[in-house]
Amino acid sequence: MATFTANLFSLLLSRLFSQPSVYNARSASGSAASQPTNGVAGTTPLTAVHLAQYSVLIILLAIPVVLYYITIYQNAYNFPYEDDLNSALSFIADYQFGGLSFWEKLKLIFSQYNEHRIVFDRLVFLLDYALVGQLNFTHLIFIGNLAPLLISYLFVKVVFRGVPLNQKLLFLLPVAYSLFSFQYWELSTWSMAALQNLYVIPFALFSLYSLCKPGRNAFLLAAGAAILATFTSGNGMFTFIAGVGILLLLQSYQKLGVWLLITAITIGSYFIGYIRPPYHPDIVDSLFNHTGRAISYFFTLIGSMLGPGRPKIALAFGGISVLITLGLLGYLWFQKKLTTYLPLVGWIAFLYLTCLSLMASRSGMGVEQAFTPRYGIIAVMLFATQAILAIEAVTHHYARLAMLGLFLLVSVFFYVSGNNQGNRRRLADRTLQMKYNSAIYNEKPAMVSLHWGNPETANVIFRDVTKKGIYQVPGLTFSDLKSPQLPCDATKLVASHTITYEVKPYLSGDFLVIYRAWAQLKKDAPRDLSVQLIARSETSCFAFATYKHTWDDVVDHTLGGHYTQPGFSCVLDKKDLKPGHYDLWLYLTSGATSAYEPIHLTLDV
């Protein structure tokens, strides 16, 4: 048995890279039933090897995919976040209750939102509202997160054609561990942003893939998908520009003429009545007066998978990535094989054009803005597409293995990195904040704190759509969020006077609620800082865990504000305390350093 297992493992590796395919070998020498056996009744060595291969590869491919969708399932919460308020809720209110004619409704669907025309988003909003009778953000999040699966299908469909399926699955591992990471976590459970920023990618990729295929129907599909990409997100119009390059390389000049006409009509329609958002930086100033900053932004954006804590390394990684792309394209041009890999070349062109547009329109906000997670999908797709092009274009057996090993190593490194795992925590933290908002609304509607740049307008929209039944807040209460009780030693409560804090609790029935407070130890709040709330009376002492919010690393200059600052929240259930008069304390600990501090607040039970 041991000998058979060793032989099986040896065959597993050797057959995985065997040339030609085992299926081709079988068809040439007869059916599977005619193959020689290894002495085990009813089993051929090839069958056993391929079952083992597929089992291992499917498990390896499934790990990031399953973990990604489990995380989405756990954090897809039916509560609006930032632009969901006006792009979705306010849109449905205007469309359904604004007394608009058919043409006015059509105009509303195509109207400008920020610098985009989010027609696809709005059609999905209308569909969900029509089917359910109200807008449900959990549904929208799930729909938005189908986009990575569509992208994966396109990779499987387009690349490594003619290569045995077992080898194709192996070569696609770098795609799985980069595409299904949490580099773009901000989009994952932000419904309108997922629909806009994720779906533009498969629409553009499908368009450019179809454009490479012969026939009128394929061309019509390419044109339709390019139009859809354009009216999903503004960068979708670069599908047309990348398509021009494809048709020139194919020397398909008749199609090129039609494509240019469709391009002019689509982009012309996009910019009819277009107004540049006043809070966006001036493009000319960014490119010509701050050229160095713009260039740094471009390379940092491409290397942003490294995370915001390493700006210089991210800049260097972006530069190396660009050099690798140029080297691959130059190699294929020199070998006269550029048209052989035209879909991938078109995809890379679209992604780089998107990076250049972000450089022009966003670099004025500062280089650090390149780390904004909503742009992470572009960096991820560039890495994945470049990896596949390198592995597929380098046909020498050992060189291909080297390319696979290199890109797989880098993708797994990014996947297990602290930055990626931190992004998962940020995702969970945002969900918890949405749950706190639900509970606050259900207990004290006037105190709800909505996440948007204009809180007053957000509250007006929120009250309006809940009154009209467009949206219903989940029935979460503070009892669902109460903090767990921890051991407490009252003898240790001696004020250290090393804690600074801001805590503004309020009572809601039997619950003491502290939401988005902050505390620092020696004027610092390290990442490993732990915060407890302590209630002490003359006879009793109780400690409660708090939920410490994650750090947000990126400054949002769009509206001159900042993302939510780090801090903590907790819900204390008075029924967990014995009757008495309690003083409230904070207990902070970080490594070997800890401190206690009274917060000069009392609680009577």
Image: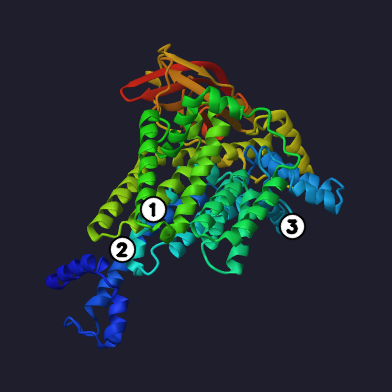
**Residue at x 37% of width, y 54% of height:** 332
Residue 517 at x, y percent in the picture: 54, 25
Q: Secondary structure at mark 2?
A: helix
Residue 189 at x, y percent in the picture: 55, 45
Q: Which mark is residue 186?
A: none
Hey, what amino acid is under mark 1? Trp
Left or right: residue 219 versus residue 297 is right
Whether residue 541 can be seen here: no
Left or right: residue 242 versus residue 13 is right
Give the CA separation, mark 2 to mark 3: 44 Å
Residue 424 at x, y percent in the picture: 45, 42
Hey, what amino acid is under mark 3? Ala
For disc 3, the neighbor class at 10 Å (few under 14, some 14 to 19, many from 20) is: few
Query: Which is nearer the eye, 512 or 96?
Result: 96
Above or below — where is 152 with respect to 545?
below
Q: Which mark is residue 333?
A: 1
Above or below — where is 23 with respect to 53?
below
Image-quadrant location for residue 486: top left
Give the CA separation, mark 1 to mark 2: 36 Å
Q: Which mark is residue 56?
A: 2
Q: Nearer the viewer, mark 3 or mark 1?
A: 1
For disc 1, the neighbor class at 10 Å (few under 14, some 14 to 19, many from 20) is: few
Give the CA separation, mark 3 to mark 1: 51 Å
Q: Secondary structure at mark 1?
A: helix
For disc 2, the neighbor class at 10 Å (few under 14, some 14 to 19, many from 20) is: some
Which of the two discs, 2 and 3, labels the residue nearer the N terminus? Answer: 2
Q: Nearer the viewer, mark 1 or mark 2?
A: 1
